[in-house]
């Protein structure tokens, strides 16, 4: 059992910050999930590489429901996720970290609920505050103590992928209030919220978005910037895990479905 989970995005595939690492599998109603278990600072931590250990799963093919279900099943209360993003905001530069607090959902073919009628019924989830403010504050505190350029707050625009966005789309997203653009945070954040777990994303800015950047975008550019940020992301996650307050009574995350008797597996 683990109370903390890391969901590693692009460039974050290896749980080398953990000790006593071993692989486990859990069967869920949505398929089998393989993940790593280990320890850090005397805490049990689960690690799931969102795209697979060799980046073999594109954004629109990720089994988001299976991943979140498995994390919930092993007892996780808090999730730290990482995402690689393009920036629409000139104040959020390549190499900066952003703790997003809102999202705009432009995905097309992803199921974003565990409640599709039938025996489980239907749930209309409140997402006024989709990202846990307490966990975000923990990450901000540790980031600043490490001297990392970290922004607490920003709107993540989630697209379907796997292609990058057009300059026209980026212009629209900017008009709508988007700060960052990526391909994976929705429905992951929604499902974690529905499953009553604290969830925060460290969005690592790898480039300015299409039409803002003077050059064409490449996946290599994303990976190169991620490699430069890898030590900082490891230190930030490690310090946050070590000093994290596991009291979930300071936020509303674990009570999102209280009116329905809570989330059930």
Image (cartoon, rainbow, N blue to C red):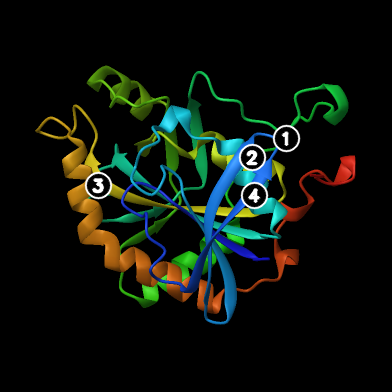
Q: Nearer the viewer, mark 2 or mark 4?
A: 4
Q: Earlier in the sequence, mark 1 or mark 3?
A: 1
Q: Could you give the CA–CA distance between mark 4 and mark 3, rounded to whole angstroms?
A: 33 Å
Mark drawn on residue 26: 4
Q: Which residue is at the front of the view, 175 or 141? A: 141
Of 86 and 48, which appears nearest the observer?
A: 48
Residue 133 appears in view: yes
Category of crowding for the residue at label 4, using alpha-carbon neighbours closer than 10 angstroms: few (below 14), some (14–19), many (at least 20): some
Tell me which label, 4 or 3, sits earlier in the chain. Answer: 4
Image quadrant occupied by the C terminus: top right
Task: Report the Cα–Cα distance between label 1 and label 3.
Answer: 31 Å
Which secondary structure, mark 1?
loop
Q: Does the CB distance between marks 3 and 2 fall below 8 Å?
A: no
Q: Position of residue 50 (x, y in %)?
A: 45, 45
Do the residues under discs 2 and 4 have CB atoms within 8 angstroms? no
Check disc 4 and report its element: helix, strand or loop: strand
What residue appears at the point 84 percent right and 46 percent down from the top-left corner? 262
Q: Quadrant of residue 121?
A: top right
Which residue has dot 2 on it? 191
Sequence-earlier tag: 1 or 2 = 1
Choose the circle earlier in sequence order: 3 or 2: 2
Residue under pointer 3: 206
Q: How many marks?
A: 4
Q: Is residue 128 visible to us here?
A: no
Density class for disc 1 (Cα within 10 Å; few <14, some 14-19, many ≥20) is: some
Q: Which mark is residue 156?
A: none
Cα distance in 3D space between marks 3 and 2: 26 Å
Residue located beneath label 1 in the image: 125
Instruction: Quarter of the image for the N terminus: give it.
Output: bottom right
Badge nearest the viewer, 3 or 2: 2
Q: Secondary structure at mark 3?
A: strand
């Amino acid at each position: 059992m683990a109370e903390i989970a890391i969901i590693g995005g692009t460039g974050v595939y290896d749980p080398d910050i953990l000790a006593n690492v071993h692989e486990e599998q859990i069967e869920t109603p949505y398929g089998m999930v393989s993940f790593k278990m280990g320890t850090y600072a005397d805490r049990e931590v689960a690690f799931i590489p969102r795209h697979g250990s060799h980046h073999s799963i594109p954004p629109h093919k990720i089994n988001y429901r299976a991943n979140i279900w498995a994390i919930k099943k092993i007892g996780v209360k808090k999730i730290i996720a990482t995402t690689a993003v393009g920036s629409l905001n000139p104040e959020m530069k390549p190499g900066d970290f952003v703790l997003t607090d809102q999202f705009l959902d432009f995905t097309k073919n992803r199921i974003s609920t565990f409640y599709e009628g039938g025996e489980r019924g239907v749930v209309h989830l409140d997402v006024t505050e989709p990202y846990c403010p307490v966990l975000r504050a923990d990450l901000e505190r540790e980031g600043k103590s490490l001297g990392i350029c970290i922004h607490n707050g920003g709107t993540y625009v989630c697209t379907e992928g796997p292609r990058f966005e057009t300059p026209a789309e980026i212009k629209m997203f900017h008009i709508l209030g988007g700060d960052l653009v990526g391909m994976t945070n929705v429905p992951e954040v929604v499902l974690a919220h529905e499953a009553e777990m604290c969830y925060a994303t460290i969005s690592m800015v790898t480039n300015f978005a299409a039409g803002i950047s003077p050059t064409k975008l490449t996946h290599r550019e994303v990976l190169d910037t991620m490699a430069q940020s890898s030590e900082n992301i490891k230190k930030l996650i490690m310090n946050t895990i070590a000093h994290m307050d596991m009291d979930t009574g300071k936020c509303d995350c674990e009570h999102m479905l209280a009116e329905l008797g809570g989330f059930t597996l």
